[in-house]
């Protein structure tokens, strides 16, 4: 057996085993009884629900990862990459288009295989714990938009990589690394104003005590930014979150609308939940 194949398989299995041990330890040490330190701050019944939610999500993640590891190992050992490569070469479209076809087949296959797991996570687990607000239409549109972005942005980036490897000789890896790094920095600038609005609405945060408090704290820390925005997170979930994105003075702070109107959305404190 090829030594490189052995190394790849060892990395895949080793990474899976390590994550499995960590996740199993997390589940084993989950306790549904409210810690004494939280008494008076958390409702005992709601805390129990939050731990059950975390346990169910973790267990589902283990099942998903296990299935995809089995699929990946089977695909590799059966020569799947070579089969797809030979099929793509049959079109005789040159190295770049051949590479794009090869990548497209692999990515599309992965997305299709992962789709049932995403459906179950969104419409079964999240629905069970009253977090889901995603409609079937929104779910489908999100997937289609995501696939289109992968095709356009990922296709452009991968085409550049293939071109460098075909033209730059022994230094191709260096040029590719520089190009990919610059491309990622560019994405950090354009994502908040071009990509993210394709999935959510962003409106400036209204004037008021909350905005003044955030502005005051940001100024006290010398944290320069472009603005404060509110995002319609309630379109997909009742969970609350906030984040900032961008570089330098182009950074922006974004609050989920569920965070601003927290009492009306979050009827329980999900201490172990995912934001």
Image (cartoon, grey):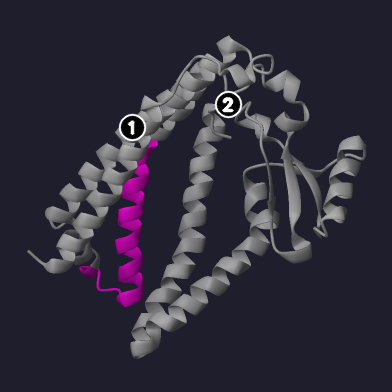
Q: Tag 1: Cα neighbours inside 10 Å, few (<14), some, or many (≥20)?
A: some
Q: Callout 2: helix, strand or loop?
A: loop
- Residue 163 sits in which quadrant? bottom left
Residue 240 appearing in the image:
yes
Judged from this view, the residue extending furthest toward the top is 45
The residue to which callout 1 is attached is 24
Residue 234 at x, y percent in the picture:
67, 29
Residue 173 at x, y percent in the picture:
39, 80
The residue to which callout 2 is attached is 271
Residue 90 at x, y percent in the picture:
20, 68
How far is disc 1 from disc 2 in space, using C-alphas? 19 Å
Residue 116 appearing in the image:
no
Residue 134 at x, y percent in the picture:
57, 28
Q: Residue at x 77, y 31 (%)?
A: 260
Look at the picture and state if 239 lies above or below 93: above
Report the magenta residues as a range: 89-116
Residue 104 located within the stretch drawn in magenta: yes
Q: Callout 1: helix, strand or loop?
A: helix
Quadrant containing the C terminus in the rendered view: top right
Q: Residue at x 56, y 17 (%)?
A: 47
Q: Residue at x 28, y 42 (%)?
A: 68
Residue 46 located within the stretch drawn in magenta: no
- Residue 89 sits in which quadrant? bottom left
Look at the picture and state if 261 lies above or below 141: above
Judged from this view, the residue extending furthest toward the front is 36
């Amino acid at each position: 057996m090829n030594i490189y194949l052995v190394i790849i398989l060892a990395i895949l299995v080793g990474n899976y085993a390590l994550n499995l041990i960590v996740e199993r330890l997390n589940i084993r040490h989950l306790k549904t009884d409210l810690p004494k330190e939280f008494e008076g701050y958390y409702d005992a019944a709601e805390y129990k629900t939050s731990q059950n939610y975390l346990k169910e999500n973790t267990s589902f993640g283990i099942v998903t990862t296990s299935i995809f590891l089995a699929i990946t190992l089977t695909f590799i050992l059966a020569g799947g990459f070579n089969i797809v490569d030979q099929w793509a070469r049959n079109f005789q479209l040159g190295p770049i288009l051949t590479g794009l076809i090869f990548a497209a087949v692999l990515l599309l296959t992965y997305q299709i295989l992962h789709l049932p797991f995403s459906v179950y996570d969104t419409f079964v687990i999240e629905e069970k714990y009253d977090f889901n607000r995603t409609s079937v239409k929104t779910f489908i549109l999100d997937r289609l938009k995501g696939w289109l972005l992968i095709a356009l942005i990922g296709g452009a980036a991968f085409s550049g990589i293939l071109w460098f490897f075909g033209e730059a000789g022994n230094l191709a890896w260096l040029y590719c690394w520089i190009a990919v790094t610059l491309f990622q920095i560019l994405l950090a600038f354009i994502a908040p104003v071009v990509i993210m609005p394709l999935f959510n609405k962003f409106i400036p945060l209204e004037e008021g005590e909350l905005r003044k408090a955030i502005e005051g704290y940001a100024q006290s820390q010398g944290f320069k930014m472009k603005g404060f925005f509110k995002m319609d997170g309630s379109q997909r979930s009742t969970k609350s979150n906030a984040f900032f994105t961008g570089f330098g003075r182009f950074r922006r702070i974004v609050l989920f609308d569920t965070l601003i109107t927290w009492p009306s959305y979050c009827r329980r404190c999900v201490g172990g939940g995912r934001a």
